[in-house]
Image (spheres, grey):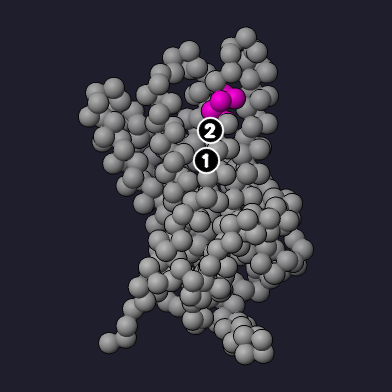
Amino acid sequence: MSERTDPSQMNNEPQKLHAMGFGELLDTTFSLYRAHFRSFLVITSVYCVAMLIVFSIVFLDDSVGRGARIAIWISTISVIFGVSVFVVTGLVFASAEVYLDGRIRTGAVLRQGMRRFFQCFIGSLLFGLIACLSLLLTNILFAVLVDAYITTVGIGGVNVFLLNFTVGLVFVIIIVYFAGFFLPYWSFFVSTVSLEERSMRVGLRRSRELIRGTRLRVVGMVLAIFLLSLAIGVIFRIAFGFLLSLTEHVGMMEFLKTFRWTTYSQLLENQSETSLSYVLMYLINVGVDTFTMPIWVIGCTLLYFDQRIRKEGFDIEMMETHQGE
């Protein structure tokens, strides 16, 4: 039986590059995260601090006026998007460093992330806008078809339960389809632009090249990595929700409602009614997001290298590079 590497011994040892199956990729992801937990957390703390600043801005005095507060909110969301892209870019560099060299130089990682920030930010913004627009237009078209069907058969001829079930199922399928289409391209785009220092245009082409021929495998693995990270976050949130419910100040269901990103807007509408426990719930959610973010970034970065190994012989290239040094 082959020996397994002790994660505690992986701090300063580069990984032996080879193609990995899904199970080994996940094992390597968690091993790298566990061995370099503090370094990854330092990088993601930038996101956490940014979110704390958001809360400070949101709780400005009401005298600024609702219109001004909405303008501040929109501007703040834009900044948070930029910070998130910067943190993801830094995590990609950190994941590559620890995978290839066995160590993370946090300062160098943050400087590299800043240097490639503009390309990653613009590319991510375009991906997000195209994905949202495509999703919106698809849902509008679907809603028009449903409305046309109801008009044709009449209200009396519609089975409400079956219609609601079908609408819900189709909506989930649409979400999964667009996530499966855009997430792999976006994750490979960020890795390519960051690590290979490519332009946005070349980064898009490289993403297609790396995914071509193995689309189903890549889509399945990317979705699984994101869903696993999401599931871990949900487990932590439920655990914190249970602990908060024991204080009898916050109910479990009330806490679970704060999972949705749309509820952040409630801080604008219900500021006067917001209690300390309500703020605490949002802070817990931010903390959980900060903790789980490295999981999916490391996993997607390792998948990027795995695709390069399978399609381009990247492991042989690195071996020859090291032998020539």
Please say whether residue 298 is one of the residues in the magenta stretch: no
Counting from the top left corner in percent of width and height, residue 142 is at: 54, 44
Counting from the top left corner in percent of width and height, residue 192 is at: 66, 66
Which residue is farthest top? 63
Q: Which residue is more in the foreground, 147 or 102?
A: 102
Q: Is residue 303 above or below residue 282?
A: below
For the residues labelled 2 and 1, say whether their Cβ atoms are less than 8 Å apart: yes
Counting from the top left corner in percent of width and height, residue 91 is at: 56, 57
**What numbered label is drawn on residue 52?**
2
**What numbered label is drawn on residue 323?**
none
Q: Is residue 180 above or below residue 20?
A: above
**What numbered label is drawn on residue 48?**
1
Q: What's under tag 1, amino acid-wise?
A: Cys
Counting from the top left corner in percent of width and height, residue 321 is at: 65, 85
Q: Which residue is more in the foreground, 69 or 207?
A: 69
Give the magenta range: 54-58
Viewer can see residue 27 = no
Q: Taking 302 as reference, is 80 left or right?
A: right
Q: What's under tag 2, amino acid-wise?
A: Leu
Viewer can see residue 53 = yes
Give the overall secondary structure of the magenta segment: helix
Please say whether residue 56 is one of the residues in the magenta stretch: yes
Q: Quadrant where the N terminus lies?
A: bottom left
Q: Residue at x 42, y 38 (%)?
A: 285
Q: Quadrant where the C terminus lies?
A: bottom right
Q: Dot 2: few (<14), some (14–19), or many (≥20) neighbours within 10 Å?
A: some
